[in-house]
Amino acid sequence: MTFTAKAILFDMDGVLIDSAPAVERVWRKWALAHGLAPDAVIEQAHGRRSVETIRAVAPYVDAARENVNVEQMEIEDKKGVTALPGALELLRKLPQERFAIVTSATTPLAVARLGYAGLTAPRHLVTADDVLDGKPSPEPYLRGAALLRVAPADCMVFEDTPAGIASGHAAGMRVIGLGNTYSARDLYAAEAVAASLADLAVSVCDAEIVIEWKISPSRRN
């Protein structure tokens, strides 16, 4: 299977970086402190802005204040935050004007995690601080396309969560799912699913980026 695009929009956590242990530690600690079921809170947290997770699971608390606390906890917890297979090689291959990172993390948290993982923050970065509505709203990915000055239909999104896939599709983009956080079954809405970036061969050919599979992908029905 082969896809072509003019630009790539990457989610960060679960696509470029493995931060799942840190995310789960922080949200488990926060949930227990507020008398909430940790697993239910963690399920809400994947792929969404932290402030939206807090509003969803604890609408009675001061979400803005709690968001500051959660963000600081996440910045301080760097144990096990590493680059996922294929991430560093792919980012080095792509020209800066042909890709952006579109993350539900805040800017300080995104920059911190990229640094922990040995990755450099790109020229084009969309974070929770840049949008009014986070994923699954189309706003984050539409903003990423606008930064690159590329039509949404010419962008390929790389995502690892159902919320992120829904965001990319709502923005009018195609999405490749990566099975680093959820199973391929959970990512059924994506155009195709790869186990990780290491399974993909990406090349830049003039105006096009060509994305091919090194092994056969899972396909959406």
Image (cartoon, rainbow, N blue to C red):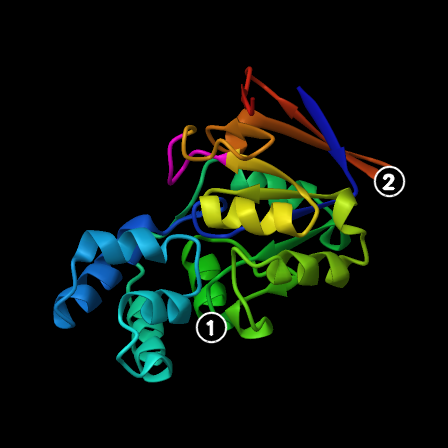
Q: Position of residue 159 (x, y in %)?
A: 53, 43
Residue at 47% of width from left, 42% of height from top?
160
Amino acid residing under circle 1:
Pro
| Residue 59, horizontal then vertical, whole percent | 30, 74
Q: Which mark is residue 108?
A: 1
Nearer-the-camera pick, 190 or 74: 190
**Magenta region includes residue 182:** yes
Mark 2 neighbour density, 10 Å: few (under 14) some (14–19) many (20 or more): few
Q: Position of residue 84 (x, y in %)?
A: 44, 41
Which residue occupies the foreground of this view, 164 or 181?
A: 164
Res. 31 image quadrant = bottom left
Q: Nearer the viewer, residue 178 or 172?
A: 172
Seen in the image, is 1 located left or right of residue 47? right
Q: Is residue 97 left or right of residue 55?
A: right
* Callout 2 secondary element: loop
Q: Is residue 13 above or below residue 66?
A: above
**Residue 138 image-quadrant placement:** bottom right
Is residue 145 placed above or below 65 in the rendered structure? above
Q: Give neighbour class at mark 1: few <14, some 14-19, many 20+ (Cα, 10 Å).
A: few
Q: Range of the magenta residues?
A: 178-183
**Which of the labelled discs sits on residue 207, or is there none?**
2
> Which residue type does callout 2 highlight?
Ala
Kindly tell me whether residue 75 is visible in this rendering.
Answer: no
**How far apart are labels 2 and 1 at the CA level?**
33 Å
Where the C terminus falls, by quadrant? top right
Secondary structure character of the magenta stretch overall: loop
Q: Quadrant of residue 157?
A: top right
Quadrant of the snapshot with the N terminus: top right
